Image (cartoon, helix red, strand yellow):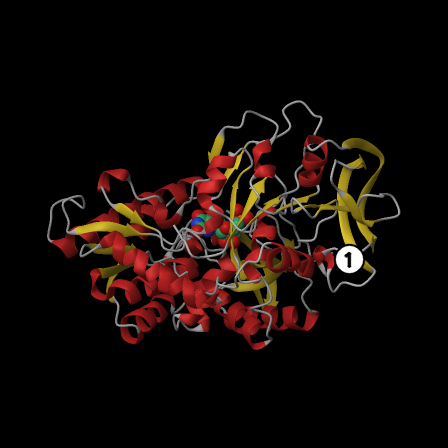
Amino acid sequence: MTSAALSRILILDFGSQYTQVIARRVRESQVYSEIVRCNITASEIEELAPKGIILSGGPASVYEKGAPQIDLQIFSLGIPVLGICYGMQLMGRHLGGEVENSARREYGAGLLQIEGDSQLFEGLGEQIDIWNSHGDRLTALPEGFHAIAHTENSAFAAIADDERQLYALQFHPEVSHTPRGKEIIQNFLFRICHCAMDWTMGSFIEDACARIRRQVGRENVVLGLSGGVDSSVAAALLHKAIGDQLTCIFVNNGLLRENESEIVQRVFGENFHIRLKYVDATERFLTKLAGVTDPETKRKIIGAEFIGVFEDAVMELAGTKTAGESNFKFLAQGTLYPDVIESVAIGGNPASLIKSHHNVGGLPEKMHFQLVEPLRQLFKDEVRLAGQQLGLPNEIVHRQPFPGPGLAVRILGEVTNKRLQILREADTIVGSEMKASGWYYRVWQSFAVLLPVRSVGVMGDQRTYENTIALRIVESQDGMTADWVRMPYEILARISSRIVNEVKGVNRVCYDISTKPPSTIEWE
Ligand code: XMP
């Protein structure tokens, strides 16, 4: 839990695709926000003592059977509430107004005409551009409310009851298409809820260190370091908190990119002086993968092997016969906030759903570790910020995501030493050209894939019959959806030309122009 003194905003989630965006907008304003189930009770809220409550949008219609409801006592707690879209309709309906299914759906850009001088719109002038996405709309005001803005289609685009500090917006202030939406959110945070700007990475790190020390006491902690952003920041944070009580295990599975294990050993071993156990398990993994071509089988083998190698390393470090008996009581993981947000199934039974995370290859319960998850409160961009403040270099903090099964899922067909070498060389060229052109940090991922396809080419006067590399360069917010990047032709040309000229065994390069969905980012 966060220290009690922090100003806190609770966001009740009614299933909007933008709920996490609301939470991030609040945090970007240096106020701590937490997403909670929409069926949280008023007394549970009182215990959390938030400075304000935001009701998210959602896909349901308030009159629909099974539409998510709200504990009406929440409106009588004396805590300011801001309802957005579905949140507004809920307030409207339950506080005595009328909501109707609008004949004209308002979707997309609109113009908001501001009326009067509500604190919520202070400093915004008379009209602003907004983004709508709703079917239902309020047609009669609830008691005590007045309109504070309208649009062409709606007389009640924003409403307020200043006495009870209840506010509601039909549009979405959290999305970037409402360019001044952040100011509206900040007016709510600071003018209405009187929040302090106390959510900073400096205060988070200090707080997290104290919590880690309290949790682990004098016990030892082990962490599977992959070199990715999350496990790296977790390692740096734990090291700051408990120094040599932390031991990191870095497993080289033989499926890493060029120089990857050297970078991790240099940054963590030499620069940070973290206790680091390096395990070269290349042979073990490649032997198990010999002859395997099915993608799921590859993934399963790699996952199982990782657990075995990790367990062996713990036993070796501890000098025990099982990992459970070791002197490592805690296992640290880089679990992030989006992995642990509790949500309610909208439109069905409000069964509590907690997304499972798959860090560290799902180490089994029989290892009897207690978990330390110091990044559980953070979004990815906050993790990067924390990493920077902890002194991690850019090459780690701004790393593109890399899958746990490594290059094995980028080699279609059998994984062999020779094919790994071809892919590594091609991938190094992609990485260096992306960095040299400044594109590496602008995209979500950029990498090479080795296809199980050979084709005819000509080099000098010789006919060739060689391998094909596919280039995958995508942009994405969270990896759930993705689009291929419209890269400048010159950069693609340079990457292609370098690969066919420099990588022995490749005579053709293709550019993958598929989106996710229906494709995925990785090829396996
Ligand atoms: P897909 O291929 O499912 O990938 O579109 C979405 C994102 O997840 C990454 N990815 C993984 N990350 N372990 C990981 O830690 C995995 O097994 C794994 N598989 C895919 C992928 O690189 C992309 O960013």
- The kind of residue tagged 1 is Asp
Please, is residue 409 above or below residue 354 in the view? below
Looking at the rendered structure, the secondary structure element under dot 1 is loop
Q: Nearer the viewer, residue 326 or 142?
A: 142
Q: Nearer the viewer, residue 115 or 457?
A: 115
Please provide percent x and percent y for residue 280.
26, 60
Q: Which of 498 and 12 is in front in this view?
A: 12
Please, is residue 337 above or below residue 459 in the view? above
- Local crowd at mark 1 within 10 Å, few (<14), some, or many (≥20)? some
Please provide percent x and percent y for residue 59.
67, 36
Residue that extends furthest to the front in the rendered view of this protein: 163
Please, is residue 468 above or below residue 359 in the view? below
Q: Nearer the viewer, residue 433 or 204?
A: 204
Residue displayed at 57% across by 43% down: 78
Q: In which quarter of the image is residue 145?
A: top right
Residue that extends furthest to the top in the rendered view of this protein: 65
Residue displayed at 18% across by 46% down: 323
In this rendering, would 108 be left or right of 406?
A: right
Please provide percent x and percent y for residue 515.
65, 50
Please provide percent x and percent y for residue 110.
83, 52
In this rendering, would 239 be left or right of 218?
A: right
> Residue under circle 1?
117
Q: In which quarter of the image is residue 133?
A: top right
Q: Report how many numbered discs are placed on residues in the image.
A: 1
Q: Does the residue labelled 1 lie within 8 Å of ligand 1?
A: no
Q: Can residue 478 be seen in this view?
A: yes
Q: In which quarter of the image is residue 358?
A: top left
Q: Is residue 14 visible?
A: no
